[in-house]
Image (cartoon, rainbow, N blue to C red):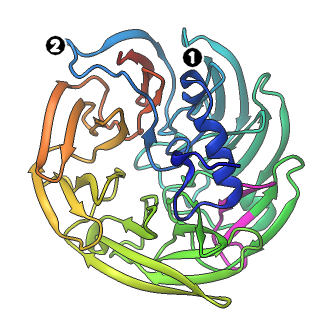
């Protein structure tokens, strides 16, 4: 079979290459899916085309807006439906909405009494993003409840309480990691002795494996391929780790620690084999190169910069540069980083704790104050083409979702759809 150009890339399994190739040959409408955290490839990049280069003064055309509830869970999208989570009257709610109208199609609700050890400083709402896979929706609640429901009906299929059943230790601010699918399994970060990571059968919910003693923070795992071996890579409390995606056996670990023992960001793996991670505080940013020799994975640190830290927000990669929001509340800035050297090639003040997605050669950014921006970025700088202030209420920490030309946003009170065409 001839491999489509968009299907190639280091770090992809043969199965992933085949799926990518088949998807690349489908009509453009079939590409417009956002199955979970970070989008189709978990790297906050969309294949959408034909987006407008400017917006009206008051922002993109609003298609619909409706009330929702408390939570930072971002929005998964598939087959004309949106999936997210919120908290209401002591319950956690998994909700499916009509993507065209915002109307509720179904809700799956369950009691979620807050665990005493979990801080509610930033609210009690769920923080993890649903995953749509094989006609099912998988969710992880703030208190460690893992659910699988039917994507069409919301009917429960299976569930587990990670804390009650397995003694998993909750992070300080509750569970926030978004699970990832690998073949027939659902992999999630746990926490505590022997339960650092867990894998469950996608269909039945049976526990397939649990391994490692590291503590959970808030990072979501990605699946990468290192010289023929599939690995689940994630930031835990003091380090970035890679385990066998098939068995959970630890393959490597590398220090990445800040003063709070808190890592939030999602690792980014490039087609050139560079693994990038960032965190707030003194951990900053670093890039690693992974190689396999025999049965051992070797880790080489390519560069590290403690000044490039950020607790919230993600990065996207274009060519040889990472683009992201850095700095804490007092001195935030947007920057471009050379992926191979770590050099900051430019930075611009502002864009506090911004999340972003890349689509159609444009960067769509949402900062925590609720300001939405459309920009072009490159090694020479950033050009803000359009901006609308305070479109959402602070703190707008939920990363946007793009399906075709429709952008979906939420804060802790409402959810809305915007036309970017």
User: Where residue 205 is drawn, which disc sits there?
Assistant: none
Residue at the spot 54% in from the left edge and 55% down from the top edge: 8
x and y percentages locating residue 195 in the rendered image? 71, 72
The answer to whether residue 144 of the structure is visible from this angle is no
Residue 191 falls in image quadrant: bottom right
Label whose residue precedes the other's in the sequence (2 or 1): 2
Look at the image and give the residue range highlighted in magenta.
180-198
Label 2 to label 1, Cα distance in Å? 25 Å
Most distant residue in the front direction: 2
Q: Is residue 369 visible?
A: yes
Residue to which mark 2 is pinned: 57
**Spot occupied by residue 223 in the image (x, y as percentages of width and height):** 60, 61
Labelled disc at residue 99: 1
State left or right for residue 2 relative to residue 165.
Answer: left
Image location of residue 153, percent across then percent down: 80, 22
Label 2 SS: loop
Q: Which one is nearer the viewer's eye here, 216 or 30?
A: 30
Q: From the viewer's perspective, is residue 3 above or below residue 396? A: below
Specify whether 80 is left or right of 120: right
Q: Are marks 2 and 1 in contact (CB under 8 Å)?
A: no
Residue 184 is a magenta residue: yes
Nearer the observer, 321 or 370: 321
Say which residue appears at 47% left-offset and 13% top-offset.
Answer: 66
**Residue 228 location, quadrant:** bottom right
Q: In the rendered view, would you say 413 is above or below 98?
A: below
Disc 2 crowd rating (10 Å Cα; few below 14, some 14-19, many 20+) is few
């Amino acid at each position: 079979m001839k491999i489509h150009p968009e299907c190639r890339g280091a770090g992809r399994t043969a199965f992933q290459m085949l799926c990518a190739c088949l998807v690349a040959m489908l009509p453009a409408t079939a590409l417009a899916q956002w199955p979970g955290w970070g989008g189709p490839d978990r790297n906050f990049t969309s294949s959408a085309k034909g987006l407008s280069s400017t917006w009206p003064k008051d922002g993109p055309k609003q298609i619909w807006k409706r009330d929702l509830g408390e939570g930072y869970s971002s929005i998964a999208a598939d087959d004309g439906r949106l999936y997210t989570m919120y908290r209401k009257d002591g319950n956690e709610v998994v909700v499916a909405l009509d993507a065209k109208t915002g109307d509720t199609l179904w809700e799956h609700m369950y009691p979620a009494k807050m665990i005493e050890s979990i801080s509610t400083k930033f609210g009690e709402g769920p923080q993890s993003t649903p995953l749509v896979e094989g006609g099912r929706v998988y969710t992880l609640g703030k208190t460690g409840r893992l659910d699988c429901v039917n994507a069409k009906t919301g009917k429960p299929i299976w569930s587990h309480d990670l804390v009650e059943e397995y003694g998993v230790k909750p992070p300080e601010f509750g569970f926030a990691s978004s699970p990832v699918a690998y073949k027939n399994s659902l992999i999630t970060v746990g926490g505590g002795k022997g339960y650092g990571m867990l894998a469950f059968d996608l269909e039945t919910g049976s526990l397939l494996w649990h391994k490692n003693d590291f503590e959970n923070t808030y990072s979501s795992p990605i699946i990468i391929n290192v010289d023929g071996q599939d690995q689940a890579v994630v930031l835990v409390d003091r380090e970035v780790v890679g385990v066998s995606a098939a068995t959970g056996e630890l393959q490597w670990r590398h220090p990445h620690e800040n003063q709070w023992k808190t890592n939030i960001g999602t690792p980014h793996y490039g087609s050139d084999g560079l693994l990038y991670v960032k965190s707030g505080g003194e951990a900053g940013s670093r890039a690693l190169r992974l190689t396999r020799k025999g049965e051992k994975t070797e880790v080489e640190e390519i560069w590290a910069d403690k000044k490039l830290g950020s607790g919230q927000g993600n990065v996207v990669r274009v060519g040889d540069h990472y683009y992201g929001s850095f700095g804490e509340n007092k001195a935030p800035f947007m920057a471009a980083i050379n992926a191979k050297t770590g050099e900051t090639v430019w930075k611009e003040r502002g864009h506090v704790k911004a999340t972003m997605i890349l689509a159609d050669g444009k960067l769509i950014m949402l900062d925590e104050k609720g300001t939405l921006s459309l920009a072009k970025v490159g090694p020479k700088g950033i050009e803000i083409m359009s901006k609308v202030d305070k479109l959402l209420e602070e703190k707008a920490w939920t990363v946007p979702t793009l399906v075709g030309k429709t952008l979906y946003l939420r804060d802790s009170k409402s959810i809305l759809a915007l036309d970017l065409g």
